[in-house]
Image (cartoon, rainbow, N blue to C red):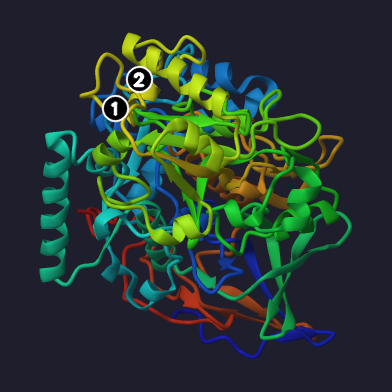
Amino acid sequence: MTGGQAGAPGSRGGAAVEEFDVVVVGSGAAGLTAALRAAHLGLSTVVLEKAAAFGGSTARSGGGVWVPGNDALRRAGVPDTPETAREYLHAIVGDAAEPERIDAYLEHGPDVLSFVERTTPLRLRWVRGYSDYYPEAPGGKAVGRSAEPKPVDARLLGEDRDRLEPPYSAPPLGVPLGQADYRWLSLIARHPRGLLTLLSLGLRWLGGLLLGKRQLVMGQAIAAALQVGVRRAGVEVRLNSPLLRLESDGARVTGVVVGRDGDEAVVRARHGVVLAAGGFEHNAAMRERHQRAPIGTEWTVGAKANTGDAIAAATAVGAAVDLMDDAWWGPSIPLPGGPWFALAERSRPGSIMVNERGERFVNESAPYVDAVHAMYGGDQGRGDGPGENIPTWLVFDQRYRNRYMFTGLGPRQPLPGRWYKHGIVVQAPSVGELAEKMGVPAAALESTVERFNGYARAGEDAEFGRGRSRYDHYYGDPRNRPNPSLGELNRAPFYAVKMVPGDLGTKGGVRTDTRARVLREDESVIDGLYAAGNTSAAVMGRTYAGPGATIGPAMVFGYLAAEDLAAAGTAVSGTVGGSDVVDESGGATETGGVSDAGGVNESGGLSESGAVVESGTSGGGGSHDASAEGAA
């Protein structure tokens, strides 16, 4: 560690006081990207994480990154232009987000990902054919603009390995896999590529095991790679450090107050604070106040530490909010161990979604945000009273069950008995008897199934257009004819599984500008305060551009926040990652530090108690290229 060891912190009314150039709250993709960029711009930086693990909802996610024109897409030869991407995003978002923010995201996105790939072990690859969610919209791409991380070797994390937020569910068949792999693995009983994918994954897993590797995939790979990057840059990530409130001198935000070992600690920010602590999906009171019933914290797969603390702290100093009634929704199955975000299950041929009237109400293969908007009913899910199509059931037959994986279970594998005990699933030898067990009108459900079977035979859904979009086909069955998304329900027994309006996290948050600065209701900037990720109102508005449209903007606006922080003041000369332990009597001691010009000296790392820790070995400087380390 350069610059000397930290002395005893100063105090203010009994609270310990420290000072950095930049204080980042939250350790998901937004927070870690902000910290990474700030450190490489010469700003002393600390990351404060409420949970006992780092990575937030990013680590729990599928790990898609939707940033048009990035290097991974260019390497793969994906045809695109900035103008086309701009046309698409403006067309689908409309006036639900400021056009200037959309343009800033698209303009800077490729450079952000290039920077991250240079300074961390993260390596991205195109997810071939994973369509934009609205490929028929102006500028939409059926070939897809989504990228995902290549596997990262968990050994790069060292002691931090056991402090990574776990994924929201175990991988299907127990094999680590990416988004592209899942598409084919889930068709293992229907397509040769399913078996080939399983064999490839198995060999990769076995090879890693023999070499002592533990492969991290999806969102875990992104969080791990970013953590390695910030550690190399000398940034400390402090766990168990919940945000209590922001500090302000009346003119600007000057720091934060966090909980530490049952007490309070003040961490000052010379340049500013970046709030990247996720949304409020696990705050029941906030959800009930802002969102339509029925709503519950038990249906989200977001990180459990996401209780809206950063949003509340920002509004307490005058921040405006937007989109608080919306979320990154997805129809989910409320399993006993936690919700299953149903990406593929509702899109496979031979299944339909119905309401308590026994009627279809949506294209079941629609983008997941749209599907839940339809569950609630009204204009993009907005309206008075409880959701119009909730409770919702996913209905399918035995042919469907024989052909496809379901919530990670293999084809033909019996649904667990406890699901029946909990009332999550019912089964019957006929559609009419199934309706009775569901509590819906038998005649209505029988009519719905009969009508849908006619659509399946014809290959055209005359009611909701299921199977018309190329996106619908991604989780369809390419061997099903005449439409990959439509199949008859006619082989007993029949099943109905409950579906709820689940989510990946909330979409509403504080309003920000093109530089991620937090705004008041009158559009004025709150000096010293920035927000990114789900703490900020989504640049995607009420829609979802494609796979990874949460993580992509999170990284981009975290990066832009750091850029503005560096421009807003003079960095601590020649050091990165250090702090000043403030002596309230007038002195200050520099601690930590990384010379960005002369080479990174890893003085960062994870701390469970808030104390400065040393970890790792020397790496490169601000221009350090992680090359292919950790990427498979």
Residue 192's quadrant in the figure? top left
Residue sitting at the far right: 250
- Residue at image x 59%, y 80%? 610
Amino acid type at mark 1: Gly
SS assignment at label 1: loop
- Residue at image x 51%, y 51%? 424
Where residue 226 sits in the image (x, y, percent)?
A: 41, 58
Where residue 70 sits in the image (x, y, percent)?
A: 36, 33
Task: Give me the disc on residue 129.
Answer: 1
Q: How many numbered marks have been drawn onto this rendered protein structure?
A: 2
Residue 479's quadrant in the figure? top left
Amino acid type at mark 2: Ala
Circles 1 and 2 in contact, beta carbons < 8 Å? yes
Left or right for 316, reference 593: right
Task: Give me the disc on residue 142.
Answer: 2
Where residue 61 sits in the image (x, y, percent)?
A: 44, 51
Where residue 134 sits in the image (x, y, percent)?
A: 47, 20
Task: Give me the disc on residue 51.
Answer: none
Residue sitting at the far bottom: 8
Q: Is residue 586 above or below residue 95?
A: below
Seen from the viewer's position, the closer of residues 383 and 267 is 383
Left or right for 527, reference 352: right
Q: Is residue 466 visible?
A: no
Check the picture and name the quadrant holding the N terminus: bottom left
How much space separates mark 1 and mark 2, taking CA atoms?
A: 7 Å
